[in-house]
């Protein structure tokens, strides 16, 4: 169903959930010139004319939820250097299929995104993609080698929205300098908070399951130590720290205390850490090999509580495409990572909302204004004047997750065969449909 | 034995009489029992070889060393059957088998395949000067050119029937039973037919 | 002619031997029982039986090994198998070929069994799922080394008559040891009491939850146990900082005659080899009257012959057609 670009578009008859404005009501949404013009009852023309007579079009959203499009603070799009796994275009379209209208692309390409040209390439490729908006993060240090800071000013001017190393910054001094220096440019530092010595060589959580399987473990204390260090640095510097993919109860406790004390820290958690635990590794399934590792059920439970009460600000997919033969290896040899853009809302809605852990408005908050706020990205609200980045959700849609149907080039998901309830059925970026289940 | 219809071919007394006669025949076959070794084929051949050994001693021929042979490793159908049959003991008496007359003892002679396997096994254990075959029942139906030197009872039995030799140590009774019905092989150490 | 109504029992072992964790006590007992007659074969003048005649067995060793490789090699040869040895130095792995590609290539050469030694835990299970040949795990990372534990069990049963109720303490680097894991599973399944004794740095997380009692000092272990299984302390553990020095390790955790003298009863001493004399075990103990270390080596061949024999069994479908023909 083509939309009339530039003209008026009414989205009619749905339940509008916009946590940023505190809205949860039956309403219509009016889009003009790619921006939200109004949200209210009875805005849309009635009848079956499709709005043609009013100089626009009408989208019927009866039975659907209208929400600000999801924002993923953490995705790996593998381009350049890993185009067999994902490209910026395929990743942006996969994101749109999951209800995402924006994502932050990690600098983990090959070569790493550590200069303005590489950032500019990602921005341009994102614009051409025709899916979710792509906001690149730049490497914190040159080549992610942990020695010399990248030119924050240059990469931010080229469009980088954050700085990320993709691994623990081993030097405490370099991390301090990054948190200090980034303040001049108003961008957050995305922290992979982990003690590299404690975590060294670990391929799963250190516990009774790793002992049984004979796999080298990463202890929970590696994350606790890393979060404690980086939170202390954020407090000392006043810099903005966003803690990536929290996985342990101990880290949640540290974050709660830091937030209570006014430290400028935000945090994200992934669907797999929220829903799965280390027992899934029995049988050495590499589709469960993620970093940080899946933790015991008690940690996952603490993570869900932290998500519900806001200690965890947002959901991140940590979308990490892997070619099938990379995962088709002995466990130690297989790379970490799972894809998540196309499954995040469905699995979280099924398990957390229908499971009674949190309400739909809270989930939407953690997937849209939460991450947008954490990374300072546009979007996250249906407030008039904002870009019309909208997702239409069908909370009753029943489907089985089938990796072969993914728009992503990769299939490495731990949720294959998952029976989900709820799905994004249409995604609009700047008022344009970039993905629809009907097509 | 729970076979539908079965007939006792030999009762305990008949078996004992046959064993005594077989012992005498063995003694006649060889010139004295000094270099004799009895090797019973697992499983019931072992018990029969004990009976024959006792019969030889009882009739004044003296003590004959006995050993056991498990022919599982030498079965020509080992890779065709599954699951793996249980392997029982192979025991060569301290005298060894080199340059000795070895009496292979089994309960029933049928296709000849068990005997063939037993001879391969035996020749890997040493080099007997002579091998004789002694069976309680020869039921005919040979698939290999094998014949027994000493036989307790001979008969032609249809392939649809089966012969079971009972020994007290395994079956609680001594005798030979002929039964109709499926000729399945309950004894793992003999090749199924 | 209809097949016997009495269906044949399921195959005693599956297609593969990946570890002792998935086995039942009766399956372990079957392997041990089967090993007894195979032990006799190695005492024959002609140490060879035609059990695996015409079968091709590939020993695929991604990690260096002398003992396990030799033991498997002897076992295979005494069963008349054709054996091919592929070691990490000449394997394509160094050229970046993945395990599954190496295995598929071997498979394409119509092999029957693979004995796999690999540095990565789970490698044997990985391979077993992907190729139709029988796979025997000869050690995968720190996961399992089932045939070593089976020969340890065989040796214990041989000496004590039974495993049930025995108290066995495994001493040494439990953290990195696949032998320890397989032994813990095997001993527990066979009804023994299991303990481990090591410096805390060499104990894996949650080992108590695997059913093993933990002793912090050798003295306590010696007082409690009937048998000690002493593991090799890899010299690189010192460089990894797990223990400060070999001298201190020997002084605090080494199995010495003085320590054993304080035991209420003589303890049977096992060691999977190769030994570091003067580190985890003193020569006087290793060569002493209660050491069964060389018997373990002898038994290893018999146990491996039993495993090869049991796994090489014909497919159940072949058994059925045989029964139907009978």
Image (spheres, rainbow, N blue to C red):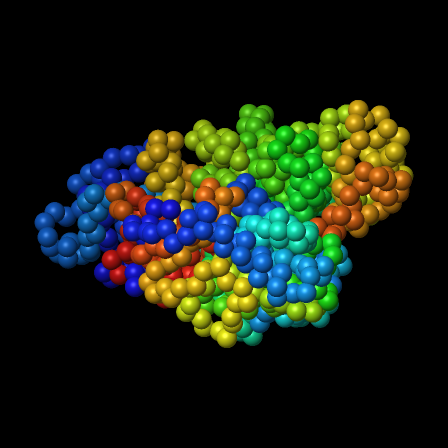
- Image point 43% across, 31% down: which residue? A308
Q: In which quarter of the image is residue B155?
A: bottom left
- Image point 36% across, 64% down: which residue? B157
- Relative to B138, is C61 on the left or the right? right
Q: In which quarter of the image is residue C58?
A: bottom right
Q: Is residue A207 above or below residue A32?
A: above
- On the image, the x and y values in percent for residue A329 come to 56, 59
- On the image, the x and y values in percent for residue B26 come to 60, 61
- Relative to C216, is A324 on the left or the right? left
Q: Which of A316 and C166 is in front in this view?
A: C166
Quadrant for the C terminus of chain B, please. bottom left
- Relative to A15, is A47 on the left or the right? left
- On the image, the x and y values in percent for residue C226 come to 73, 31
Q: In this view, does A191 lie above or below C136?
A: above
**Would residue A419 be seen by someone viewing this image from the given angle?**
yes
Q: Nearer the viewer, residue C7 or B155?
A: B155
Q: In this view, does A243 lie above or below B85?
A: above
Q: In which quarter of the image is residue C179?
A: top right
- On the image, the x and y values in percent for residue C313 come to 51, 60
- Image point 38% across, 61% down: which residue? C323
Number of numbered tags placed on the structure image: 0
């Amino acid at each position: 169903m083509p939309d009339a670009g530039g003209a008026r578009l009414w989205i009619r008859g749905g339940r509008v959930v916009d946590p940023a404005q505190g809205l949860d009501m039956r309403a219509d949404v009016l889009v003009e010139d790619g921006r939200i013009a109004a949200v209210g009852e009875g805005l849309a023309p009635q009848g079956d004319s499709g709005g043609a007579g009013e100089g626009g079009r009408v989208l019927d959203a009866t039975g659907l939820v209208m929400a600000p499009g999801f924002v993923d603070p953490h995705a790996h799009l593998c381009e350049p250097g890993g185009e067999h796994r994902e490209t910026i275009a395929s990743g942006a379209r996969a994101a749109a299929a999951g209800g995402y209208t924006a994502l932050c692309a990690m600098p983990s390409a090959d070569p790493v995104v550590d200069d303005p040209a590489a950032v500019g390439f990602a921005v341009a490729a994102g614009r051409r993609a025709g899916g979710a908006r792509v906001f690149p993060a730049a490497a914190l240090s040159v080549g992610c080698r942990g020695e010399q800071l990248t030119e924050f000013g240059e990469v931010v001017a080229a469009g980088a929205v954050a700085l990320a190393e993709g691994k623990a910054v081993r030097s405490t001094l370099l991390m301090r300098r990054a948190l200090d220096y980034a303040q001049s440019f108003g961008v957050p530092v995305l922290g992979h908070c982990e003690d590299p010595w404690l975590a060294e060589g670990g391929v799963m959580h250190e516990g009774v399951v790793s002992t049984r399987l004979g796999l080298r473990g990463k202890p929970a204390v590696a994350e606790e130590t890393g979060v404690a260090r980086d939170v202390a640095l954020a407090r000392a510097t006043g810099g903005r720290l966003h803690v990536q993919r929290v996985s342990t109860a101990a880290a949640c406790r540290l974050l709660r205390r830091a937030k209570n004390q006014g430290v400028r820290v935000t945090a994200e958690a992934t669907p797999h850490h929220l829903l799965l635990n280390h027992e899934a590794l029995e049988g050495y399934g590499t589709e469960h090999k993620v970093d940080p590792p899946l933790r015991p059920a008690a940690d996952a439970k603490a993570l869900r509580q932290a998500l519900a009460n806001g200690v965890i600000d947002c959901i991140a997919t940590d979308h990490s495409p892997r070619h099938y033969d990379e995962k088709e290896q002995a466990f130690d040899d297989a790379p970490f990572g799972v894809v998540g853009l196309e499954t995040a809302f469905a699995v979280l809605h099924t398990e957390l909302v229908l499971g009674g852990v949190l309400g739909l408005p809270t989930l939407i908050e953690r997937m849209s204004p939460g991450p947008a706020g954490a990374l300072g990205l546009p979007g996250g609200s249906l407030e008039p004047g904002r870009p019309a980045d909208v997702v239409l959700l069908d909370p009753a849609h029943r489907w089985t997750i089938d990796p072969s149907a993914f728009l992503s080039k990769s299939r490495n998901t731990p949720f294959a065969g998952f029976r989900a309830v709820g799905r994004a059925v249409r995604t609009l970026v700047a008022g344009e449909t970039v993905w629809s289940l009907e097509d | 034995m729970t076979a539908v219809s079965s007939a006792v071919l030999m009762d305990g007394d008949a078996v004992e009489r046959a064993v005594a006669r077989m012992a005498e025949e063995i003694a006649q076959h060889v010139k004295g029992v000094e270099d004799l070794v009895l090797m019973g084929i697992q499983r019931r051949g072992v018990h029969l070889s004990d009976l024959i050994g006792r019969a030889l001693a009882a009739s004044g021929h003296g003590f004959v060393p006995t050993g056991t042979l498990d022919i599982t490793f030498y079965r020509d159908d080992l890779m065709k059957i599954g699951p793996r049959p249980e392997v029982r003991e192979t025991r060569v008496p301290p005298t060894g088998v080199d340059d000795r007359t070895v009496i292979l003892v089994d309960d029933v002679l049928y296709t000849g395949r068990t005997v063939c396997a037993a001879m391969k096994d035996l020749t890997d254990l040493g080099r007997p000067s002579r091998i004789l075959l002694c069976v309680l029942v020869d039921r005919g139906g040979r698939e290999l050119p094998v014949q027994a030197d000493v036989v307790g009872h001979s008969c032609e039995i249809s392939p649809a029937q089966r012969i079971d030799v009972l020994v007290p140590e395994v079956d609680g009774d001594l005798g030979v039973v002929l039964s109709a019905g499926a000729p399945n092989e309950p004894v793992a150490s003999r090749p199924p037919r | 002619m209809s097949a016997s109504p009495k269906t044949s029992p399921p195959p005693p072992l599956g297609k593969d031997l990946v570890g002792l964790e998935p086995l039942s006590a009766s399956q372990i007992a079957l392997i041990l029982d089967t090993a007894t007659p195979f032990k006799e074969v190695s005492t024959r003048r002609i140490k060879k039986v035609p059990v695996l005649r015409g079968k091709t067995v590939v020993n695929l060793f991604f990690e260096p090994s002398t003992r396990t490789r030799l033991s498997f090699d002897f076992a295979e040869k005494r069963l008349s198998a054709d054996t091919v040895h592929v070691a990490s130095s000449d394997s394509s792995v160094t050229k970046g070929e993945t395990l599954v590609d190496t295995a598929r290539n071997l498979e394409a050469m119509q092999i029957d069994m693979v004995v796999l030694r690999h540095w990565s835990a789970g490698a044997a299970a990985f391979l077993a799922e992907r190729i139709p040949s029988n796979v025997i795990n000869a050690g995968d990372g720190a996961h399992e080394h089932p045939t070593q534990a089976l020969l340890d069990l065989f040796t214990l049963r041989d000496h004590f008559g039974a495993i049930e109720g025995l108290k066995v303490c495994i001493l040494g680097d439990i953290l990195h040891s696949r032998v320890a894991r397989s032994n813990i599973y095997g001993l527990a399944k066979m009804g023994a009491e299991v303990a481990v004794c090591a410096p805390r740095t060499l104990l894996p997380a949650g080992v108590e939850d695997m059913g093993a009692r933990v002793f912090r000092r050798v003295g306590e272990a010696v007082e409690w146990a009937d048998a000690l299984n002493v593991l090799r302390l890899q010299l690189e553990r010192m460089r990894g900082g797990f223990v400060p020095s070999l001298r201190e390790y020997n002084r605090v955790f080494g199995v010495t005659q003085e320590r054993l003298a304080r035991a209420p009863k003589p303890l049977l001493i096992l060691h999977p080899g190769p030994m570091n004399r003067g580190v985890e075990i003193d020569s006087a103990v290793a060569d002493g009257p209660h050491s069964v270390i060389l018997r373990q080596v002898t038994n290893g061949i018999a146990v491996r012959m039993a495993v090869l024999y049991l796994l090489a069994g014909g497919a159940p479908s072949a058994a059925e057609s045989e029964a139907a023909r009978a």
